[in-house]
Image (cartoon, rainbow, N blue to C red):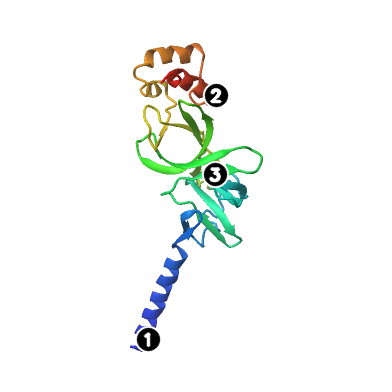
Amino acid sequence: MYKVKSLFLLVEGFLFLSIACAQELRTQLGDVYYDVNMYKGEYYGTEGSPYLEEAFTPCRINDITETQLVRFNAYNGTVEVKMSTTKIVLLAESENYLITLKDGSGKTYYTKNYFDSKGDLKNSFFELIHESSSFKLYAQEKIKYFKAVKPEAYKDAQPPSFKKAEELYFITDLWEKTPYLIELPTRLNFFLKLFPGQAKSLKKYIKENRFELDDPEDLIEILDKALGSK
């Protein structure tokens, strides 16, 4: 009986510690999720990195006056904040954050909910690359994970790796105010479906100017044409 009771207390203590290590911490950043294992190599032996930059970058978050240190995980779309040498927190998906980098780049990021190309609602961080009275254009930087490849007759083995993917572009307030971002298609026919009343004229405008839907400067010109007078 004593051994059983001791085992029960041991298990109960382990569960308590596990919950305590993965609890939501109430800080000036809101409800943030803390994981003590965040520093551990989840992808040990993998080439590349899931982060835009491995080092933490100084920034301002929302209207908090103190400088924060952040890094962006472009594999899973999360933002990590370094609270101390032993504590890192994830910004909560339930909140919207404005992150202004203080590294001289002038970059501004927002965390937002968005609909991907499959229509699924997700959350990630986005760089604001253009703002006008008619629309805001955001870029989403993504990093993909590739599993290890076994050697074959004429192919060498490849270790698991992280590689940067093509940037995706999103817009908000397309025809009405909405808190969600919408992914802009890179295929012309799908892109034109967003502007059914202007599809013919926009198609002509894009082809005449040889615009590319994966070029942000071209996208700004196209969207100015489509939304400038709305």
Element type at marker 2?
A: helix
**Is label 3 in a helix, a strand or a loop?**
strand
Q: Which residue in the structure is indicated by mark 3?
A: 99
Comparing labels 2 and 3, the label whose residue is closer to the camera: 3
Q: Nearer the viewer, residue 230 or 104?
A: 230
Q: Amino acid at mark 2?
A: Glu
Give the x, y percent position of residue 225.
46, 17
Between 151 and 219, which is closer to the camera in this rendering?
Answer: 219
Q: Earlier in the sequence, mark 2 or mark 3?
A: 3
Quickly name the residue at label 1. 3
Disc with the residue nearer the chain's start (3 vs 1): 1
Query: Residue at 33% of width from left, 88% of height from top?
Result: 1
Spatial CA span between label 2 and label 1? 70 Å
Secondary structure beneath label 1: helix
Query: Where, by quadrant of the figure, is residue 3 drawn?
Result: bottom left
Residue 147 appears in the picture as rendered: no
Answer few, some or many: residues within 10 Å of disc 3's Cα (few below 14, many 20 plus, some between 14 and 19): many
Q: Which mark is residue 148?
A: none
Residue at the bottom extreme? 2
Q: Are marks 3 and 1 in contact (CB under 8 Å)?
A: no
Residue at 45% in and 25% down:
134
- In this rendering, the answer to whether 188 lies above or below 176 is above
Residue topped by disc 2: 217
Regarding residue 124, the answer to whether it shows in the image is yes
